[in-house]
Amino acid sequence: MQIKISMDDQIHTDEVLEIYKANEWSSASKPVELMAALRNSHGLVTARCEGKLVGIGNAISDGHLVVYFPHMLVHPVFQRQGVGRQMMAAMLKKYAGFHQQMLTADSKAIAFYESLGFARAGKTEPLWIYSGTEH
């Protein structure tokens, strides 16, 4: 299985929605907003297998000090095969040297992100106003 990681890929609504729905992310119910958010992100990473989109992630950043990785999804069929690790490696390379690299991980993904060097941010607690239900 050959996976191609890209930081300058063109994404299409139908293929993006397929991954979000397969992962049961509520963002799929807002396709216009989701596509605008992804396309206007500071960084966007994709993974493709034989041309099919199998992973996507984005970054929001001030471009100098802080980067936040809000979305990192791999189609369930391709999970646990190193796809997410390759995508995060590309993002971490792009944002290497930034003072603060942040993300919020749910319980299923914590060990994965810890294996990439992320750690709990001191005594901080994540806070949000959230309209989804999947977390």
Image (cartoon, rainbow, N blue to C red):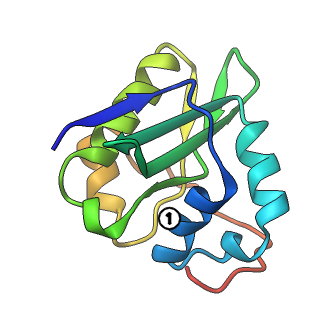
How many numbered marks does the figure carry? Answer: 1
Q: Give the residue type that dot 1 points to.
A: Ile
Task: Describe residue 25's horizontal placement relative to residue 56 as left or right.
Answer: right
Provide the secondary structure element on which disc 1 rests.
Answer: helix
The residue under the point 47% across, 29% down is: 91
Q: Quadrant of residue 79?
A: bottom left
103 sits to left or right of 77: right
Badge 1: residue crowd in 10 Å (few <14, some 14–19, many ≥20): many
Residue 108 locus on image (x, y percent): 34, 71
- What is the residue that sits farthest to the bottom in this orientation? 133
The residue where tag 1 is placed is 19
Residue in view at x 76 percent, y 24 percent: 62
Residue pictured at 74% horizontal, 77% vertical: 29
Does 121 appear above or below 59?
below
Q: Is residue 74 above or below residue 49?
A: below
Q: Is residue 14 visible?
A: yes
Q: Nearer the viewer, residue 84 or 69?
A: 84
Residue 101: name its quadrant: top right
Most foreground residue, 22 or 117: 22
Residue nearer the viewer, 123 or 130: 130
Q: Position of residue 2 (x, y in %)?
A: 20, 37
In what quadrant of the picture does the N terminus appear? top left
Q: Is residue 121 visible?
A: no
Q: Specify the quadrant that holds the C terminus.
A: bottom right
Question: Which quadrant holds residue 80?
Answer: bottom left
